[in-house]
Amino acid sequence: MSSRRKVRLLYQMTTAKQNTELGHGEVERRLAFCRACVGPDTDVDISVPAYGPGSIESRADAAAAVPALMDNVLKAEADGYDAVVISCFSDPGLDACRELVSIPVTASAQAAMHVASQLGARFSVLSPGKARSSKGIENPRKYGLWDSFASVRHTGLSVMDFARDREQTLDRLTSVGRLALEEDGADTLILGCMSMAFHGIDGELSERIGAPVVNPIPASLMMAELLVRCGLRQSRLAYPLVRAPVMLAKAS
């Protein structure tokens, strides 16, 4: 196990500067939120992509975010960060980024789902939007947590709705969360969107509905810190180190 030292984490946003509604003040607020999730021996910085989608609400949005993520993960390793956290519940580019660098790369959904599986028998994800597609069930299958997965419950609100109205978000999540417990057999909930997670409402929501609510932000940050302090990183048998694709050098 590594000795106690300063750990440097990069919290990698997935929405681009020029396309997102998040201004400088909101990025600073989110940075303060991240820093409050870790201890005094861990430093956190936020990186916002220079190009890509303004929000991620589909597979197409997630795919469009990946080139910038790969660029930034490579830069993070070169800049001396100990680990990178991908901030999106779709976990876009996670496997690809792990092939590019030797530092640990963690992601929001994977970390939150593994935490939730240790708190109860079945978890549900509270997700933005109205569409019911196979997108929401892909990661529980991929991460080997299908037996612990109860459902995805959609809130009917967009990603940007969460950023605009905290009280509406909390009321809607309370209603939908209770349905997940009563109708789907869940005993633990996960906030399945970074915009709602950055409201810091998981504690209040848990009190309202009487079940644990996992916030993916501290879950992913502390998972990254855990890996660094234990001297662990992604297996090269699963994620062989590859050269960065030529397309990255041409991105603008």
Image (tube, helix red, strand yellow):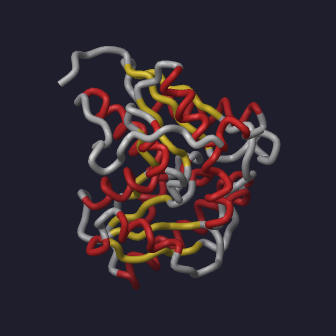
- Taking depth in this image into account, of 60 and 14 the one nearest to the observer is 60
Name which quarter of the figure residue 40 lies in: top left
How many numbered discs sit on the rendered protein? 0
- Taking depth in this image into account, of 88 and 163 the one nearest to the observer is 88
Quadrant showing the N terminus? top left
Check the image and report above or below for 181 versus 97: below
- In the rendering, at what x and y percent does residue 63 appear? 63, 58
- In the rendering, at what x and y percent does residue 191 appear? 49, 58
- Taking depth in this image into account, of 247 and 163 the one nearest to the observer is 247
Q: Residue furthest bottom?
A: 183
Residue at 45% across, 62% down: 208
Residue at 61% across, 37% down: 71
Q: Residue furthest right?
A: 18
- Taking depth in this image into account, of 237 and 152 the one nearest to the observer is 237
Q: Residue furthest left?
A: 1
Residue at 67% across, 65% down: 60
Q: Is any part of residue 216 visible from this angle?
A: yes
Side of 111 relative to 23 (left or right): left
- In the rendering, at what x and y percent does residue 172 appear? 60, 68
Check the image and report above or below for 240 versus 161: above
Quadrant showing the C terminus? top right
Q: Is any part of residue 168 visible from this angle?
A: no
- In the rendering, at what x and y percent does residue 21 appear? 79, 47
Residue at 43% across, 43% down: 99
Check the image and report above or below for 52 versus 17: below
